Structures are given as C-alpha cells and as structure tokens.
Image: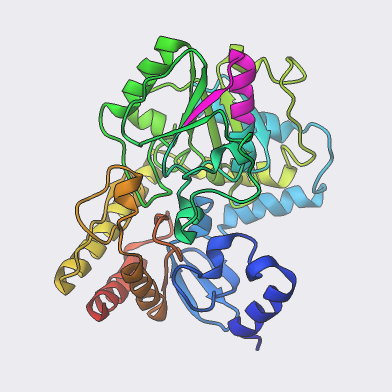
Amino acid sequence: MTTNDELFARARQVIPGGVNSPVRAFGSVGGTPYFVARGEGAHVWDAEGTRYVDLVQSYGAIIAGHAHPAIVEAVQRAAVDGTSYGAPTEREVVLAEEICARVPSCQMVRLVSSGTEATMSAIRVARGFTGRPKVVKFAGNYHGHGDLLLAEAGSGLAALGLPGSAGVTEAAVHDTVVVPYNQVPQLDEQTACVIVEPIAANMGLVPPDIDFLHGLRAECDRVGALLIFDEVITGFRVARGGAQDLFGIAPDLTTMGKVIGGGLNIGAYGGRVDVMEVVAPLGPVYQAGTLSGNPLATAAGLAVLDLLDAAAYETLRRHAESLAEILRSAFAAAGVVAHVPVAATLVGVYLGDPLPSDYDDARATDEAAYARLFHGLLDRGVAVAPGAYEVMFPGLAHTDEVLSEVATAASEACAAM
C-alpha cells in the first residue's frame, strides 16, 4: 500500500509544493496532506484506506455527494459519445437555458472552463461595455487567480499570509481599487464595474450587512458602472437562483462555477442581453476556449441541477443549521471562544471574538487554534479545509447519521484544544 507520505514525497519532485492548488499542501496547518483515492456520498477514503466525513466537498463543487449515481451515469453516457469536439453541442444550449431560467438577471450566458476564467472574462466584458478602466473589488473577496483581482484576495493567499502575488505587475493592478467589505464605496465615472462576493466565503464566512448589497446596486446605477456578483461559490448553492435570489438584487453580470459542473471543470458568466452582446462573435470583446461547453461537464451539470429542487434546498439548509449547532455546542462545552456563522447552506468557523464583518476582522482569527482543530477533527475522521479562511459545504449526503459522526469528533477535538 502506498502511503500519503510516500505520495507527497513523489509529488514534490514533479509538482511545485507537491500540490496543484496551494492550500492543499497543508502549509498553514502543518502535516502531510491526505491523498484521496475515492469518494462516495459524504465520505472520502485516502490512499491508506482511512475514511473521512468530507466537509470540503471539492470546495463546493460537490453538492449532492461524491459519485452520485445520477451524475456518474450522465457522465458515462456522455463519454461514450466523445469527450470534446471543439464544436457546439445541444447539451450546452440546454445548460445555458437552465441557468437563464433559474437566474433571471442572466438573459444570456457564456460557458467557460473555470470560475477564474469566468471572472476574468466578466471584467473584460464590463470594461468593453462601459469603455472605462477601473475595477472595484473588496478586501478578502477571492475571484480566482487573474492578475488584476489577486490583491487582498482572501482564500489561499490569506492562508499563506500573502497580500498578492509575485509576477503581477503594477500595471496589471493599476486600475484595481480595493475597498473594505460591507462598506459601500463612492464610485466615479471611471469605474467600469464593482465585483463582489454577495456572501463572502473566502475570508471565513462573512454575510453581507442588510444594506450593503442594495447600496452597491444604487451606487453603480448612480455612476453607470456595472455590478458583478461573483457567485462561483453561492450560485445554485445557497438558493435556486443563488445569492441574488436570496437578497432580491439583480446584478448586471454574474459569474458561476462549481455546482454547475457537478464536479467537473466548468464556469460561466452571464447578464443582460445588451451587456453580453459585446462578447465575440457578436461584439468586440474577445473570449474563447477549446474546452468551453465540454460535453462531460454539461452532462454532469444538468444532472446535478435536476436534483436541486425546493425540497433539496430545504434539506441543505437543515443540514447546515445542524452542523453549525453541533460545532457551537462542542466549542461551548470545551470553553473555546468561537463563532459559527451560517449563511443559507454555508457554514463557517471563526476562532475569536467578535464575529467579523470585513477582512481586517477576519484576519484576526486564531490560525494556530484552527490548525489544532483541523488535526483534531482529521484524527477523528472528519475532514475540513486545511486553511482558516475557507468554509464548510454540508450537502445532500450529510444525513443525520453522518452528522452524528461529526458531533462525536467535534466534541472530542474541541475538548482536546
């Protein structure tokens, strides 16, 4: 049997840091990462055969559970006919129709291959539509690894203690303005767009203040800037129509990913017809991708969306509240100062006081304590993200029986802290 240590040693010889996404290296929590061999439902098994209740769920890309039969069958059926064509397919049309039906602000949609690609493209569209240069983003919001959006980006950069990335020139971020989350900035006529996570899920879980998103909508309207909701995490996760459905706000552009691929590589951006018509081949804003609308990803995406009806969202909300109450009880019993915020179907952990409302607050979380919590849970068969700035993704497969496993592990892990 190959061990996790052996695999990590081999990986570091051929992959930078031994991983293909930085947080997976366990740098902020210490130790050797577990290498997943397979997953089923709410669980994954590592290379050594150890089983974990998985609350990472591919950072939100999995919502129905690993290897859900309907999704596996859809991918298998699609694969028999071929895995990529570089030509249009009916299934990508159907997926775009389904997205537009669920998200009314999206009158047209372009499929891409990742959330990063979606946000990069949406920014380009906003600049092309408005003819303006400036992009406003919020500290602690993560919009992928595109150059102009990496400043104070939360997520893996926060875990690594990095304010941005080497290799990003001053010119690339010259027109990027970073402002505090949950505060409406004053815009000017040079602002092309404001991009925001409507529920911040990359600096821990920080829900928006009640007037924040409505204020952004009004301020963008005042100066003619576009409002972009980055719903790569929240889209089809927190509600049928995403966070904009929950809050009753229509952005001009929306970026999506994760859930709509059923665990396969996909992204999308969409918005008003007049805005989307600037995208080539209709307009002058160029964006392309060989694997855009990939037949396996669209098959998986349609299969998972078919599972997400009103009853499914009620189940997801119930599982999230149950998980949060389990963690709150465990912290309280152990005398650990912590907050466990819930936003619809997302669950966060903040080790400290008070509950954060912006990135500066969020960065005050006790990362050393989180590392102890992480390993305490992992040693007891529960896997959470190996970084203090991610969230937990309870899904349809996290039944009461599964959550009872989490309750036992959390009680013991918190007591050990």
Instruction: Please report the bounds of the magenta region as a residue range.
Output: 121-136
Compared to residue 271, the image places residue 33 above or below, namely below
Q: Nearer the viewer, residue 180 or 100?
A: 180
From the top left corner, tell me how far across and down residue 305 is, in percent. Answer: 53, 41
Q: Is residue 134 magenta?
A: yes
Say which residue appears at 34% left-offset and 32% top-offset: 246
From the top left corner, tell me how far across and down residue 298 is, in percent. Answer: 67, 41
Q: Main secondary structure of the magenta part?
A: helix
Figure quadrant of residue 374: bottom left
From the top left corner, tell me how far across and down residue 206 is, in percent. Answer: 32, 45
Classify residue 6 as left or right of residue 348: right
Q: Quadrant of the N terminus?
A: bottom right
Say which residue appears at 76% left-offset and 32% top-offset: 288
Classify residue 279 as left or right of residue 248: right
Spot the residue most to the bottom.
Answer: 1
Q: Nearer the viewer, residue 235 or 317?
A: 235
Classify residue 267 as left or right of residue 229: right
Q: Is residue 414 visible?
A: yes
From the top left corner, tell me how far across and down residue 167 is, in percent. Answer: 66, 48
Q: Tell me how the rendering is colored.
A: rainbow
Say which residue appears at 35% left-offset and 37% top-offset: 181
Q: Is residue 235 magenta?
A: no
Say which residue appears at 42% left-offset and 54% top-offset: 396
Figure quadrant of residue 192: top right
Q: Nearer the viewer, residue 341 or 26?
A: 26
Compared to residue 70, the image places residue 298 above or below, namely above
Classify residue 394 as left or right of residue 93: left
